[in-house]
Amino acid sequence: MSVQRIAARYAKSLIDLAVEQNKLERIKEDVDSFLELTKNRDFYLLVKSPIVNAEKKRQIFKTLFEGKYDKLTSSFLDILALKGRENYLVEIAKEFIHQYKAIKHISTVVLTTVSPLSEDTMDALRKKLLESSATDEQVELIAKVDPALVGGFVLEVEGKIYDASIASKLDELKKEFKKRNLHISLISKS
């Protein structure tokens, strides 16, 4: 079975239980916390390690999360370790967030610009996105900065990319000039 299918099934199970127990927001906080923790390279490698056995990981999870995470989340982590699925935890957590956003009608939009935008500009963009048919009922706007764009912006909405950066326009011009120079060189050889 593919990693994506495994992640989707376990994430759906956790979401279903969280909804049933009226704990969806609390469980999402735990999953967010877990994903933040996986940004630590050592913890990430521990979760993914085939060398560290599942029982040791269960003990580590219990030490780290008991009393901090909801009992449902702690039990879920424990069950995954018992079933030998703990190495999929990162993918399951990411899929949980994806399914959570679908349930809550949240679209994630990534805006990359050359320099940071003001809060007023971000609010105006968020409003425009909500008015458009490209997004769902709510918009999670993530701003990134990339000086390599030279100017303009790149907007990613639900996997679709709109590239209005000067860097991409310059690249297009460069390719066009190469094509035209090829035509000129072919004509001059005739």
Image (cartoon, helix red, strand yellow):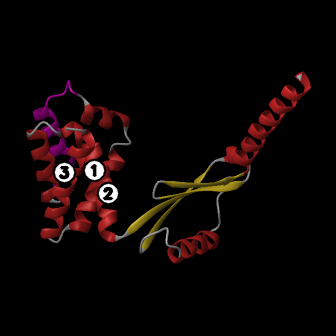
Q: What range of the chain is rendered magenta?
A: 50-67
> Relative to residue 97, is residue 134 drawn left or right?
right
- Residue 23 appears in which quarter of the rendering? bottom left
* Residue at 10% from the left image edge and 34% from the top image edge: 55
Looking at the rendered image, the disc whose residue lies closer to the viewer, 2 or 3, is 3
- Residue 21 appears in which quarter of the rendering? bottom left
**Main secondary-structure element of the magenta-colored stretch:** helix
* Residue at 23% from the left image edge and 40% from the top image edge: 88
The answer to whether 48 is drawn above or below residue 173 in the figure is: above
First-in-chain label (1 vs 3): 3
First-in-chain label (2 vs 3): 3
Q: Which mark is residue 169?
A: none
- Residue 178 appears in which quarter of the rendering? top right
* Residue at 30% from the left image edge and 32% from the top image edge: 45
Find disc 2 in the rendering and name its residue.
97
Depth check, front residue: 135 or 40 = 135
Give yes or no for contact between labels 1 and 3 (Cβ–Cβ under 8 Å): no
